[in-house]
Image (cartoon, grey):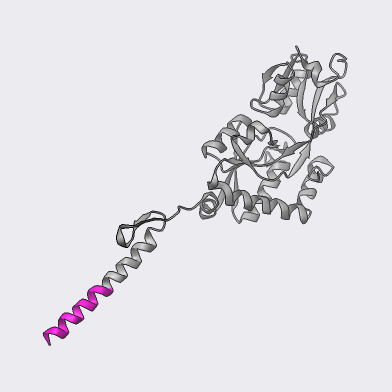
Amino acid sequence: MKKKLIAMLSIMTISASALIGCGSASTNSDSTTASDDNQTTTVTEADHLARIKEAGKITIATEGVWAPFTYHDPDSEELVGFDVEVAAAIAEKLGVEPEFKEVAFDGGLTGVSTGSFDMMANGVDVTEERSNTYDFTDAYAYDHAVVVTLASNNSIKSFDDLDGKTTANSAGSTYEAMGIEHGATVSNVDTLGETMTLVLNGTVDATVNANTSVSDYIKTTGTKDLKVAAVDEETTNYAIPLAKGSDNDTLREAINQAIKELREDGTLSKISEKYFGTDITAE
């Protein structure tokens, strides 16, 4: 009888230990655990995409002042624009809610690299220099850089003519870099409207900007005092920058798949036509 009691207690002890063991495994799936024979097994923590899905939202940096890519509707004050709708459509494909954070262009890029924002949607074009810091998704739209001057200005007819001149652009933008590269002294401004105003009142000689934004500005304002003085032949590829590293591998793949599906089902084209009157999503 004593032997049977000892045996029963032993079985109960083993069963309890097994249950405790199972409980520990399920509650420490994101930490390092020890196994038999003094071997340590590290369980990989959830990557960026998994964390986004767990949170149920994706934070998106955008300026909110660069029409028609990202701006506020003058009537409703709602944040709208090509990039805003594209980013929202991508978030829907990922199964999460978009949460837009309005910041200056350079602040958005910095926030992506430091992890303050999950991604940025702001007509960010892919450059070799940026590719050293960010992992870009596939391109979702295409454009060209242009030089804009007063209609009466005959001294600037090419990008090279910017040498010794003054331009205005957003800090950290490719257009700022292009101005500097061609010898211009660049003044930094926050909005497209401010940029154009500086050209119009003669504070600067020109601005380097996106052809799509310039066309929209001239069409919307009806101004005849500005002109496109030069067009860059190289195509600008707009893509989404993500912080560099394997943590974003699955997120980048998921966004690429979303872009592919949105292009194939006509969503990208439809959004582009809405804001530009033409399809800039086809290369």
The quadrant the C terminus occupies is top right
Compared across the picture, whether 279 is left or right of 39 comes to: right
**Highlighted magenta segment, given as a residue range:** 1-15
x, y percentage for residue 4?
16, 85
- What is the quadrant of residue 203 in the picture? top right
Residue 101 location in percent, x, y? 59, 39
Looking at the picture, tell me which residue is in the foreground, 62 or 245: 245
Q: Depth check: 50 or 55 in front?
A: 50
Asked if the magenta segment contains residue 2, the reply would be yes
> x%, y% of residue 144?
80, 33
Q: Is residue 94 visible?
A: yes
In the image, taking residue 150 as reference, residue 171 lies left or right, namely left
Instruction: Name the outermost residue toward the front.
Output: 37
The one nearer the camera, 87 or 157, is 157
Counting every numbered tag in the picture gives 0
Identify the residue at image location x=68%, y=53%: 258
Task: Give the farthest residue toward the bottom.
Answer: 1
Query: Which residue is depicted at the point 64% across and 25% down?
Result: 171
Instruction: Name the chief secondary structure element in magenta.
Output: helix
The residue under the point 69% across, 41% down is 239
Q: Left or right: where does residue 168 sit relative to residue 61?
A: right
Where the N terminus falls, by quadrant?
Answer: bottom left
Residue 19 lies in magenta, yes or no? no
Instruction: Give percent across and percent down for residue 96.
Output: 59, 54
Q: Is residue 91 visible?
A: no
User: In the picture, residue 147 is in which quadrant?
Assistant: top right
Q: Residue furthest left?
A: 2
